[in-house]
């Protein structure tokens, strides 16, 4: 019985000690993610705003992701270009942000464009993914993701 009382007392003291010790939250990098799962058709020969990602605060962010495209009816190679910008519909790409180009091969081809880069934001803001293609067929997106992780 005495050992049971001592054990209970020891557990109580340990619990009180843990409650009295201040806790510090682990430093976590702000992280943002965005997924585009709609079937979006790009305008013929023009820019299309495909996705956006919210940067939660000022800092330098590593941006990664990918965007899938399908061309139809595809009878010729179709170049597709994607980049990120600070304004929707802008033709000005971020200098260090994701910028990538690939070609959809016929017949009925598809392509996954990698999106990798970084950006230093002066405050919380939104970055926009713009894409365009060249050719006579239609090009649509069917899946894409973006992530941004603060590194500095």
Image: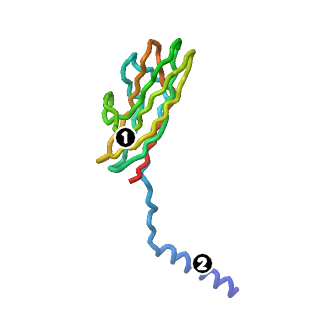
Comparing 80 with 20, the one in front is: 80
Q: Secondary structure at mark 1?
A: loop
* Residue shown at the point (45%, 39%) measured from the top left: 116
Look at the image and tell me whether residue 138 can be seen.
yes
x then y, percent, for residue 62? 42, 46
Q: Classify the position of the N terminus by image quarter.
A: bottom right
Residue under pointer 2:
11
Comparing 112 with 56, the one in front is: 112
Question: Would residue 114 appear left or right of 10 to someone viewing this image?
Answer: left
x then y, percent, for residue 50? 41, 29
Number of the label disc, if any, that sits on residue 8: none
Q: How is the image coloured?
A: rainbow
Question: Would residue 55 appear left or right of 7 to someone viewing this image?
Answer: left
Label tally: 2
Q: Classify the position of the C terminus by image quarter.
A: bottom left
Q: Residues within 10 Å of mark 1 (few under 14, many from 20)?
A: few
Q: Residue furthest bottom?
A: 2
Look at the image and tell me whether residue 73 can be seen.
no
Q: Residues within 10 Å of mark 2 (few under 14, many from 20)?
A: few
* Residue shown at the point (46%, 36%) measured from the top left: 115
Comparing 28 with 135, the one in front is: 135
In this rendering, the label closer to the viewer, 1 or 2: 1
- Asked if residue 9 is positioned above or below residue 120 in the image, the reply reads below
- Identify the mark nearer the N-term, 1 or 2: 2
> In which image quadrant can residue 105 be found?
top right
Do the residues under discs 1 and 2 have CB atoms within 8 angstroms? no
x then y, percent, for residue 38? 48, 27
Residue under pointer 1:
96
* Residue shown at the point (50%, 25%) measured from the top left: 69
Q: CA distance from mark 1 to mark 2?
A: 56 Å
Q: Residue furthest right?
A: 1
């Amino acid at each position: 019985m005495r050992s049971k009382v001592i054990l209970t007392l020891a557990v109580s003291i340990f619990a009180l000690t843990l409650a009295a010790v201040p806790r510090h939250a682990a430093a976590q990098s702000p992280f943002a993610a965005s997924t585009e799962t709609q079937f979006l058709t790009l305008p013929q020969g023009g820019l299309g705003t495909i996705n956006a990602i919210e940067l939660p605060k000022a800092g330098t962010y590593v941006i990664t992701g990918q965007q899938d495209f399908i061309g139809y009816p595809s009878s010729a190679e179709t170049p597709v270009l994607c980049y990120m910008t600070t304004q929707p519909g802008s033709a000005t790409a971020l200098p260090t942000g994701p910028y990538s180009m690939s070609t959809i091969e016929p017949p009925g081809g598809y392509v996954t464009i990698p999106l990798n880069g970084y950006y230093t934001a002066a405050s919380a803001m939104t970055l926009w993914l713009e894409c365009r293609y060249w050719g006579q067929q239609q090009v649509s997106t069917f899946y894409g993701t973006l992530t941004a992780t603060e590194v500095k």
